[in-house]
Amino acid sequence: MNYNDEFKSLQALVDDYLKAYFDALLRNIQEKSLVQSMAYSAMSGGKRIRPVLSLATAKMLNGSVEKVMPIAASIELIHTYSLIHDDLPAMDNDDLRRGRPTNHMVYGEAMAILAGDALLNEAFELLFKTSLNSGAGMEQALKASIIVAEAAGRSGMICGQVLDGESEGREISAEALKQIHQKKTGALIKAGIVAPSILIGASDEEVDVLSQYADAIGLAFQIKDDILDVVGSADELGKPIGSDTKNLKTTYASLYGLDGAKSMLSETTNKAINALERFGDRAWFLKETAFYIANRSH
Amino acid sequence: MNYNDEFKSLQALVDDYLKAYFDALLRNIQEKSLVQSMAYSAMSGGKRIRPVLSLATAKMLNGSVEKVMPIAASIELIHTYSLIHDDLPAMDNDDLRRGRPTNHMVYGEAMAILAGDALLNEAFELLFKTSLNSGAGMEQALKASIIVAEAAGRSGMICGQVLDGESEGREISAEALKQIHQKKTGALIKAGIVAPSILIGASDEEVDVLSQYADAIGLAFQIKDDILDVVGSADELGKPIGSDTKNLKTTYASLYGLDGAKSMLSETTNKAINALERFGDRAWFLKETAFYIANRSH
C-alpha cells in the first residue's frame, strides 16, 4: 500500500471513532454547548499524526488496531485540549488554528477554558473505562494509561509549556531548547507510540527502539516547525508565519541558522529510521512517517 | 471522640499526605515553578471537607483509611484545579480565595491555567497508579476512579460550571438551580463518598443510601453558601459578601427568601441524617457533618 493511502485510511479510522464518540455525547441535551465546543476543536481537521502513529505501531507489531484505538483517541483529545488552552489570550493569544477561528474566538474564553478541561478529563475517563474492560489485559492497559498521563502532565507536556513560557523573550541554550520541545511536543508523540506498544505486549527491546524512534521524530517535528515558521506560507500553515521571530523566540532556525536546522533535520530523520532496523519492512509506515515529517509543507 | 477533634485528625491526615506528595514533587528542579503554583493552591488552608468525608466513609464501613487516601487526595486535587480555573479573569475574576490572593494574582494567568491543568492531570495519574498497585482490588479501584472522572467531567462538575455561566444575569427555575448545583458542587462531594465505598467493597444498598446522603449534603452545602453570601461576614468567608446579589445570580436565597432557604436547609439536613439510619452509631461523624454544613459560618 502507498503511504498516503495508508495514512488516510488510518486517519479515517481515527476520525470515524472520534465522530461517533462526540455524536454519542451530543445526544445528551444538557451539556450540549460544552460538547459542541469540545467537538469544534476535536473535529477541526487535525492531521491526527499522534493517533495515526499509534495505530501504525499496533499494525507493525501485529497487534489489534481496535484495541489501541481508545489510547490513540485519548492522546488526540489531550492534544486538542492543549491547543485550546495554548491559544488563549493569556497564553499564545492566537486567533487562528488550522485556518479556523480558535475555540475562544468562537465560544468565548470561559467556555474555551472549560472545554479544554473537559477534553483532558474525557481522555482519562476513556482510559479508565478501557482499562476496566480489558479483562486479563487490565494491568497492561493501566501501564499504558500511566505512560499517557505522565507524558501529558506536570513533568511532561505541561512542564514543557511552562519552560517554553519562561524562555520567552530571552535567548536560551541548545540544551534548554531541546528539553523544552522534548517535553512540550515530544512527550505526547512518544506516548502515542510507546503506550500502544506496551498495551499489546511488546518486548522491552521493542519498546526501547520505539522510544528512540519516537524521540527522533519528535525532535524532527519541532525542527521542521521552526523551519516552516521561516519559509512556510501562511495559507498552508493556517497561521501567520514569522511569529517566532516576531516573538523573539529561540528556535532551531535562530540557533543554528536555516541551513544548520535543515541538516540537523536530515540527521535526526536518519536516526529515526535507523532505530527501526530490527522491524525490517514491517516498519515501512513509521519510516515513511519520518520522511513525511521532514518534508511536509505545513 | 468529639466531632471537631475527629475532623481535625482526618484533616491532618489529608494535609500530611498532600504535603508529602508535593514535597516529593518539589524535589524535581525542572518543574519547580509549576509545582509551586500547584502547591500554593492545594496547600492554602482548604477545609478538606471532600477528602475528610472520604476517610470518614471508609472508617464507618470498617474499611482502611490508607486505602482510600489516594482517592480522597485526587478529589481534593480536582477541587483545587476547579477553584483556580473558576477564579480566572475570564471566569469569576476573583482576586481572593480563602483570604489569600488567587493563583493567577500570584503566578499570572498563564501559569494559573497550566497549574489547574496539571492538578487535574495529577489527580488521574495518581488514580491510575493506585489502581495499578491494587492487586486483586484492581477492578474496584478502576470502578471508583470512573466515579471520580465522571463526577469531575463534562456531565458532572464542568457541565455544572457551564450551566452556571449560562444562567448568569437571568432568572432561572428552582429545578434548573438544583441541577446546576448538583453538577457543579454536588457531583464531586458525592464522588468523595461513593467512590471510597465502592473501593472498599460496600454493598449496593450501602452505596445507595450513601448516595442519598451525599445528594442531600451537597444540596445543603449550596443552600448554606447562598445564605452565607447574604448574611456572612467578608472576614470569615475570605471573599466579598453580597457578590451573588451584585452579579444578579439566582440563588436559593433569591428564589425562596432567606427564611425559605433556611427551612429548606434544615429539611435537607434531616434527609441526609435519615438516609444513614441503617448504619446506627457508626454514622455519627457523617451525621455530625450534615449539622456542621448547616451551621458553619464560612
Image (spheres, coloured by chain):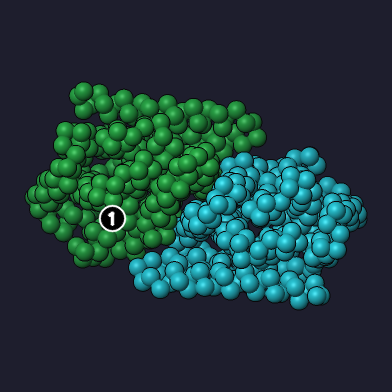
Chain colours: A cyan, B green
Please tell me whether residue B22 is drawn above or below residue A80 in the rendered image: above
Q: Residue at x 73, y 62 (%)?
A: A62
- Whether residue B27 can be seen here: yes
Residue B210 point in image, percent of width and height: 25, 46
Residue A46 point in image, percent of width and height: 64, 68
Q: Please give left or right for residue B72 compared with residue B240 in the image.
A: right
Q: Residue at x 29, y 47 (%)?
A: B203
Q: Please give left or right for residue A189 compared with residue B288 in the image.
A: right
Q: Residue at x 53, y 65 (%)?
A: A103
Q: Please give left or right for residue A195 compared with residue A81 in the image.
A: right
Residue that carries the numbered disc 1 in the rendered image? B182
- Number of marks in picture: 1
- The residue carrying pointer 1 sits among few (fewer than 14), some (14 to 19) or many (20 or more) residues within 10 Å by Cα, namely many
Q: What's the chain of the residue with tag 1?
A: B
Please tell me whether residue B236 is drawn above or below residue A261 in the rendered image: above
* The N terminus of chain B lies in quadrant: top left
